Amino acid sequence: MPIVVTPPEPTQFYVPTVDISPYLADPTSAEAGKIIADVRAACISTGFFQITGHGIPRSLQKDVFDAAAAYFALPYDEKKKLDAKTTIGHRGYDVLASQSYEADVLPDLKENPGLEVLDTNSNEFVPIAPNPDAYVVNVGSMLSKWTRNEYKSSVHRVINRNPGDRYSVVFFFDGNLDCRLSPLDGQGEKEGEEVLTVEGHMLKRMRESYGGKK
């Protein structure tokens, strides 16, 4: 008998921690059905959730963070050899000094995370407690467009409130560059609705983030 899960109201701030191991063991099980419902509830609320039970060993996580620490300990000129502005998809070393720091400051913003998600009900940022066994999943703006905003892309920020360095490892899963972000709800593209390709959307977001232009 399937498990019925009552999701929170879409306006409720909801960032659950979901153990996905039952789904990985048997996607057709009743427990897997509850996991799917819980993830969907998070997607229509904030677009954020954390997953545990993923099977990725701590040893591998440690190796990745050790490598990140070694890279960021390199001199600035060495790190700039992987300048994100010279790569497809803006992947690489990313200095955001022009966004919020003085011109002569060269911060490694990407290595100092403290994730906070905006609660639109209170208009306040809510910190997401770090869990060494969990991965944070963010729906993002592309999936929001594909679902015609059924799945939310929440405003969020990264702030380091600790005196020492902190590191995060981010993986972006994007579509093919020429794929149109047409909503998948069966209603087709509506008149006057802006529908970009994956590439067009990514370029627009980068202009908004780095240059303040639309």
Image (tube, rainbow, N blue to C red):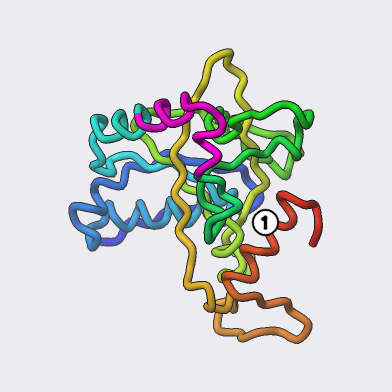
Question: Badge 1 is on which residue?
Answer: 206
Residue 96 occupies which quadrant of the picture?
A: top right
Q: x and y percent of residue 201 in the render?
A: 64, 67
State the quadrant of the C terminus.
bottom right
Image quadrant for the N terminus? bottom left
Q: Amino acid at mark 1?
A: Met
Q: Residue at x 73, y 57 (%)?
A: 207
Q: Residue at x 52, y 27 (%)?
A: 75
Can see residue 135? yes
Q: Quadrant of residue 143?
A: bottom right
Residue 9 visible in the shown view: no
**162 or 3, which is in the foreground?**
162
Residue 85 horizontal side relative to residue 134, left or right? right
Relative placement, left or right, of 74 versus 209 is: left
> How many numbered badges does the structure rendering display?
1
Range shown magenta:
67-81
Residue at the farthest top position: 163
Relative to residue 169, is residue 70 depicted above or below?
A: above
Question: Majority secondary structure of the magenta segment?
Answer: helix
Q: Give the residue displayed 79% in from the left and 29% down from the top.
A: 102
Is residue 77 highlighted in magenta? yes
Q: Residue furthest left?
A: 25
> Horizontal placement of 51 versus 16: left or right?
left
Q: Say above or below: 47 vs 108.
A: below
Please report the residue visible at 46 percent of the width from the left and 47 percent of the height from the top: 137
Q: Is residue 90 rendered magenta in the image? A: no
Q: Secondary structure at mark 1?
A: helix
